[in-house]
Image: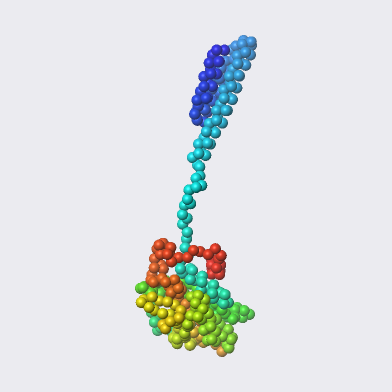
Amino acid sequence: MDDLNALREELLAAVESADSAEALEELRVSALGKKGRITGLMKTLGQLSPEERRETGQALNAVKDAVASAMDSRKSALENVELEGQLAAETVDVTLPVRPEAEGRLHPISQTLDEIVAILGEMGFSIAEGPDIEDDFHNFTALNIPPEHPARQMHDTFYLPERQDGSRMVLRTHTSPVQIRTMQAAMASKDGSGMPLRIIAPGRTYRCDSDITHTPMFHQVEGLVVDKTGRIHMGHLKGCLIEFVRAYFEIADVPARFRPSHFPFTEPSAEMDIGCTRKGGELKIGAGDDWLEILGCGMVNPKVLAACGIDPAEYQGFAFGIGIERLAMLKYGIPDLRTFFDADLRWLKHYGFVPLEVPTLFRGLTP
Ligand code: DAH
């Protein structure tokens, strides 16, 4: 019996000083496991007389129960300590200042495109799209650009390798081919539901050119209106574009003039200028005695309508082409075109825009 008391004291002390779940488990195995000390003693009970067996058995069971329950309470004590340690270590100090969050910016091109599309969208234009890789017909021929036209020469146009039939695709040099694709699609619709046409085509364009005012890739917005002859004339073109520049530059009375020009795909053609002042290298848009060229436009050349299968006696329309980078530079005072495509985060932070939460028309329509 003394031996059992000593064993009990020894085991209880060991349980009390076990300082981890692993140590406790080791102890359990060595006392109560299959080959444990208490289990070993249990096995010897059979050798005793029935009297002794009952007495020693009871005492042994009492030791076993005491050790097992000491182990249970030690186990939960250890778990509490561990939990408390974890809680203390993971305390969040809510008084600390918040970490600055990296915030993305809208590129000025996206912002300008959004603004242009929102203004023209409100006027009733819808968005049309075409491929960046074009064929000769859509980029040139159908737009009345004859083979000897300078725009076709290698120094302007990115040509793709020759195809089997000897023809070469191009990276579109302007968004005007979308005019052709839209008119063709309208003519292909059997019930004539494609007419009248009021579309804008924003997108990338490419020319083999690079200096302070040219980059090999840039953006344009093309505009096209086609309706029955007599319903659309140059007055509509002028009214629409004057309204557009006023809304875009947010200057209600910005002076505008239309200068005769030449584009193969419009007849007559014009360039639109807006009033400005230039003083000491600084440009101010609005009233003034100077003029700034802003876009090209004109009445759709009957040859272009005919190339799309539209009868020029029955239909006429107007078109315009706007350079997005140029409009962005003028409105937001960005001096160098090339910086648009340098992907310099400092530049973007300075010239970029905090994105609007409400999706604008453009981002809503183009994924
Ligand atoms: N496609 C012309 C260019 O890239 C821009 C242009 C001018 C488009 C007049 C038009 C237009 O639709 O009528 O320079």
Q: Nearer the viewer, residue 108 or 61?
A: 108
Q: Is residue 159 visible in the rendered structure shown here?
A: no
In the image, 255: left or right of 52?
left
Residue 261 occupies which quadrant of the picture?
bottom left
Residue plotted at (61% across, 11% down): 52
Residue plotted at (56% across, 79% down): 198
Q: Position of residue 77 (x, y in %)?
A: 55, 30
Residue plotted at (47% across, 63% down): 105
Q: Position of residue 222 (x, y in %)?
A: 50, 77
Q: Is residue 238 visible in the rendered structure shown here?
A: yes
Q: Position of residue 139 (x, y in %)?
A: 46, 78
Q: How is the image coloured?
A: rainbow
Q: Where, quadrant-wise, is the N terminus in this rendering? A: top right
In the image, 302: left or right of 350?
right
Q: Quick check: 101 above or below 216? A: above
Q: Nearer the viewer, residue 306 or 102?
A: 102
Residue plotted at (54% across, 86% down): 235
Count of numbered circles on the image: 0
Q: Quick check: 45 above or below 166? A: above
Q: Position of residue 177 (x, y in %)?
A: 49, 77
Residue 183 occupies which quadrant of the picture?
bottom right
